[in-house]
Amino acid sequence: MAKGEITNLSVFDVRFPTSLDHHGSDAMHTDPDYSAAYVIIETDASDGLKGHGFTFTLGKGTEIVVCAIKALSVHVIGKQLKDIVSDFRGFYRQLTSDSQLRWIGPEKGVIHLATAAVLNAVWDLVAKQEGKPLWKLLVDMEPKQLLSCIDFRYITDALTEDEALEILEKAKSGKAEREKYMLKHGYPAYTTSCAWLGYSDERLRQLCTEALEAGWTRFKVKVGADLEDDIRRCKLVREMIGPNNIMMLDANQRWDVKEAIDWVSKLAQFKPLWIEEPTSPDDILGHATIAKALASSGIGVATGEQCQNKVMFKQFLQASALQFVQIDGCRLASINENLSVLLMAQKFQVPVCPHAGGVGLCEVVQHLIIFDYIAISGSLENRMCEYVDHLHEHFKHPVVIKNASYVLPKEPGFSSEMKEDSLQQHKFPDGKVWQELASKP
């Protein structure tokens, strides 16, 4: 049982200058500096364990998320961890329903990113105290205990608690076998590391060659800035990876609805499995129109990395506006909210293919998708988890990829703890890395 009173919550603005090499560049985010608002939670428990969590940003604005986390800390410091765990739904609602702070949400934007960071740190601490990796902690929970972590407010017209219980109970069959399968084979991944929009053709060819040699069979290409350039680059990638490997496209919200349909129709010749974020991430009906128009080409619509909350996911599913659900470990409010989306996706029979990459997103989301396969969906059909080969060296327990699959984490926790040296070096603006960059002419 989790123990200890939470005595302190520290938060840091941590940034990595990835824009210098165009890592992460896409049609809308041309110069991202992968960053995190990073939380450390301490208790008075004698074991001295700490909870580490974060939310992901692209540099500027991280300081705003840090301020929001500090504002939420009044709901955390002084709490007994066992009381949080015994009423996780109540704790979640307390964080998301502060009668004044919710005005700058509710359950979206900066305040929701801050909530994710806090809850991620809490879950990391709980898993460490239980001596289990987070995915295993969730797998071992009884269905009713899992459901007690979820706030069903606003989604019962799509998924009731009884329906969620039925899904979890049904998934008990074959659960042990699926866990053994995961431990042996890992969870299938796809790579986004080869085809960032800012990469040269030479670099793209080199990275595709290396990825193919390493066993990758699923590749994502960033598109959306220039149609003729997209056609050229997609042709290059398709020729590199061959006709039988899988290609996905990602426009990162670049287009209007009609523009998206016209643009992707011209890229259909390259047989992409999906177009990701074709338009505004808030435009549910626009996504539905795009999905309907592209269905005859066999191209699905994927979205979720900037889907604000469970309510929007509910509506995307109700409107048949996406064919691939992309949860994110730091956009939604941690495990609690992601559980509700995984269960809704299962009810609507839409595969989940998480967004990852950034700084630490691969580390945390692997736990969710492994849990989903073992304890909810029981399927790997049309399912894969994104992988981006950046910044893993800064984590105490980085992801491990083998045979283009995520190897199951064995260490207790959420895999969210950064190395102390990395934290100190990359604190903004006074860490050594940023001080050195500031001193350059």
Image (tube, rainbow, N blue to C red):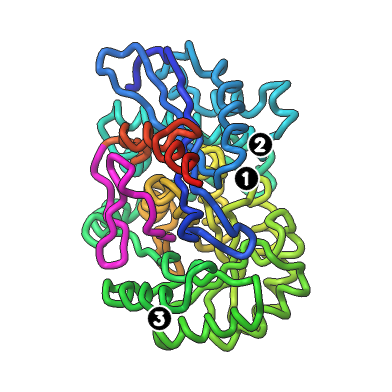
Query: Looking at the picture, which amino acid does disc 3 mark?
Result: Asn
Q: Earlier in the sequence, mark 2 or mark 1?
A: 2
Which residues make up the magenta segment?
386-411
Please state which of residues 126 and 39 is positioned toward the viewer in this rendering: 39
Q: Is residue 369 left or right of residue 322?
A: left
Of circles 1 and 3, which is in front?
3
Taking the magenta stretch, the answer to whether it contains residue 391 is yes
Please state which of residues 73 and 312 is positioned toward the viewer in this rendering: 73
Q: Is residue 126 left or right of residue 162?
A: left
Q: Is residue 294 above or below residue 113?
A: below
Q: Is residue 50 above or below residue 302?
A: above
Instruction: Name the residue tied to disc 2.
Output: 107
Give residue 310's mark: 1
Query: Looking at the picture, which amino acid does disc 2 mark?
Result: Glu
Q: Earlier in the sequence, mark 1 or mark 3?
A: 3
Q: Is residue 380 left or right of residue 110?
A: left
Q: Is residue 393 left or right of residue 11?
A: left
Q: Quadrant of the N terminus?
A: top left
Say few, some or many: other residues with alpha carbon within 10 Å of mark 2 (under 14 / 14 to 19 / 20 or more). Answer: many
Give me the residue at 47% from left, 45% from top: 440
Q: Is residue 167 above or below residue 231?
A: above
Give me the residue at 61% from left, 51% from top: 306
Give residue 23's mark: none
Q: CA distance from mark 2 to mark 1?
A: 9 Å
Give residue 245's mark: 3
Secondary structure of the residue carrying numbered label 1: helix
Give me the residue at 37% from left, 50% from top: 391
Query: Looking at the picture, which amino acid does disc 1 mark?
Result: Lys
Residue 180: horizontal and vertical position, in percent?
Answer: 23, 55
Helix, strand or loop: magenta stretch: loop
Image marks 2 and 1: residues in contact by CB distance under 8 Å: yes
Q: Earlier in the sequence, mark 3 or mark 2?
A: 2
